[in-house]
Amino acid sequence: MNELQPIVTAEIAVTERSQELITRWLSFVDGSPKTSQTYTRAIAQFFKYLAEQGISNPQREDIIAYREYLKADHKPTTIQAYMIAVKLFFRWLAQEGLYNNIADRVKGAKLDREHKKDYLTSKQLNKLLASIDRSTEAGKRDYAIIALMSTTGLRTISVISADIGDIRAAGDATALYYKGKGHTEKATYVKLSEKVEGFIREYLQARGEADSQAPLFASVAHRNGGERLTTRSLSRLVKERLNAIGLTSDRLTAHSLRHTAATLNLLSGGSVEETQQLLNHSNISTTMIYSHALDRAKNNSEYRISKAIFG
């Protein structure tokens, strides 16, 4: 098989030859635009490393050294994503007869399976909702958003991408349709309880918006009023509401509302399988993280031991 010398040079990490290979590889992978962008960035970083190290004929030990190099200033999740791209690239090179699969069986980064964000207890969530002044359009909007996210577990991207016309029937229920992760059409949905639907309708009435293609939740700022919220603006408004009631932890964010929905569903008798479907997890092992965390939270061994010792 050919060496990578025509691909990597000390002067430039991504040459015309390497770009051609990357383009062919991405076409083979056939991922979404976002996936292609991530893979392109990851492989460019790998070629840059090879060029800086003067490596034109990389071997397995160079892949391992690259992984260790990434550990210096990258998070485990980023390292894992970069290593997946490298492994897929060399697997494709081998299939094409261009280079040996030197990345085969090279491990990625060890990921912490615990959630990086906390959830809200039912009391904290009730306090958060009660603190919102619903006499204003902004208050009605924020109340509806928080109620929606904490009962459905929707991600921020799904909330800001929602249009008014995405509220449709699903069987005998009212639902909000959205794009599932990796999907191109809004074919997945969450059910809206009667109360949550009421909060959303109340907000839309106050806003005076009826266009089905208009964003479900819009900005109320003077410079961009009526325009679609961004993930940043949605995250900021939730964070400001949390800070207003003293919940200032870095582990409490807009994403915490997704964790809240999952946790409260399990605590209220929902099964792991139902929670998986609610959150649209492709792998149930991701949902099991919530279950394991609750199992530990309900384990009162420390109290029993303390009682045995101290009465």
Image (tube, rainbow, N blue to C red):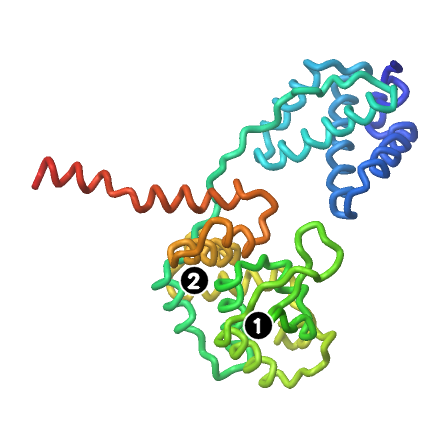
The residue under the point 61% across, 27% down is 108
Type of residue at label 1? Ala
Nearest the viewer among 222 and 209 is 209
Q: Earlier in the sequence, mark 1 or mark 2?
A: 1
Q: Residue at x 73, y 41 (%)?
A: 38
Tag 1: Cα neighbours inside 10 Å, few (<14), some, or many (≥20)?
few
Left or right: 113 with respect to 8?
Answer: left
- Element under disc 2: helix
Residue type at tag 2: Asn
What is the number of the mark on residue 173?
Answer: 1
Residue 183 lies, in percent from the top left, at 72, 53
Is residue 23 rendered to the left or right of residue 113? right
- Residue 204 against residue 62 in the figure, above or below: below
Relative to 251, say whether 10 is above or below: above
> Residue at 74% across / 43% down in the picture?
35
The answer to whether one can see residue 250 in this image is no
Q: Position of residue 168 (x, y in %)?
A: 65, 73
Residue named by callout 2: 243
